[in-house]
Amino acid sequence: MSEEFVFEGWRRPDGRMGIRNHCLVLATVACAASVVREVGRRLPTVVAVEHTHGCGRGGPDLGLQVKTLAGLVKNPNVGAAVLVGLGCEVVSAALLKGNLASSGKPVETVVIQETGGSRKAADQAEALARRLLGELEKLPRQKGTAADLTVGLECGGSDTFSGLTANPAVGKAVDRLLELGGTAILAETTEMIGALGPLLKSAENEEVAAKLKAKVERQEAWAREALGPLADVVMAPGNVESGLTTIAEKSLGCVTKGGSSPIREVVDYGDRPGRKGLVVMDTPGYDVESLAGMAAAGAQAILFTTGRGTPVGFPAVPVIKISSNSELFEAMPDDIDLDAGTILAGKSADQIGEQIMDILLRVACGEKTRAEINGQAVFAIAQEGPAF
């Protein structure tokens, strides 16, 4: 990798730099999903985001939904947005727009019940999106560096090689990114159970260590309450089939994605980091919900390691897939961006870490990831409380 990490992106009103310049068409509630889907069909250049949230949940979950949806619009990769609501939901277009006032971005709203139904709403949303796309095309690019980047870290469909190849290689790339002034978010609190000791040693100070300890122990308590004696193997069936035996084994491999840098901060789900460097975010282990938390916090790209293979991407945020073994890379070439399995053939984690930094730079410069090319964008928000 070149010593200079420089790309041309879009500087947003809040000072953050986007590596994409998307117009988001976002449903504020599940009932508006079909209208958003129709606008996306008519205008493939927008990012159309459907979901199953926006109503029927308790207070804590609704707060998470508002924060996450607003955070997605605030993400630096988004230049403008059209919010599509129904008209009687809790998370309304007006409520969400009110949470976006400080972003400085153009945000328009369409309400299906007020517009006269789904077809008229789709027509109106399409017209607004076309205008916003035209405005975004006129925005000039500006120089950005690694110090402008926040990169999310995720793993899904892990195998016995994940902790030996892909995850340590990502850790090397993260160390380099942080040396250059960037920020990385280590997520998936569930997958920190059993690895708390090493993580606490990485905490920058006692305050960070105490907060990290509380988050992981709370997650472990929930797992034990729900699963009893099975809590020690709280893993997906594919993890077990691939040879992982306990959550501790999986966790010790998972946390190596954070590299050797000190943990400077612990943040709640979807909260924007207040400090640069390595940050831990309290997210579920479920990939789709974890990705949403990091995107809402401002991650412009996500490094996603996998041993089993997954096509999952995310709206507006490029997801770079890294395989832990070469067999997977050869079996799913249309879904995997980089093969870290070559470490098993003699390459070092440092060498693959350099390759990861290379592809991160190329993606920051506009190269599309496999998930972007395939349109593999999935969106869901973490939930805690009961449904109503």
Image (cartoon, rainbow, N blue to C red):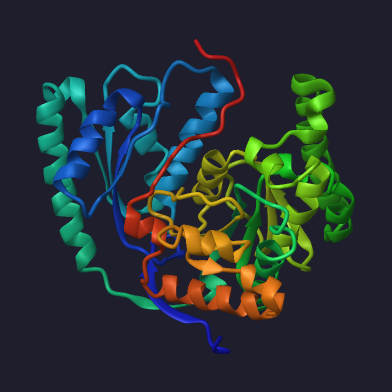
Q: Is residue 127 left or right of residue 219?
A: left
- Which residue is at the front of the view, 139 or 187? 187
- Rendered view: 108 above or below 261: above
Taking the spot 51% from the left edge, 55% from the top edge, the residue there is 298
Res 268 visible: no
- Which residue is at the front of the view, 350 or 198? 350
Task: Name the outermost residue toward the top.
Answer: 388
Figure quadrant of residue 342: bottom right
Figure quadrant of residue 143: bottom left
Res 313 visible: yes
Q: Is residue 99 left or right of residue 139?
A: right
Q: Is residue 266 left or right of residue 18?
A: right
Residue 229, percent from left and from top: 85, 24
Taking the spot 84% from the left edge, 44% from the top edge, the residue there is 194
Q: Is residue 236 left or right of residue 108?
A: right
Residue 14, percent from left and from top: 44, 60
Task: Name the outermost residue toward the bottom.
Answer: 3
Residue 40, percent from left and from top: 22, 44
Taking the spot 44% from the left edge, 62% from the top edge, the residue there is 333
Image quarter hosting the N terminus: bottom right
- Rendered view: 180 above or below 137: below
Taking the spot 18% from the left edge, 37% from the top edge, the residue there is 38
Residue 106, percent from left and from top: 28, 51
The number of discs equals 0
- Which residue is at the front of the view, 57 or 193? 193
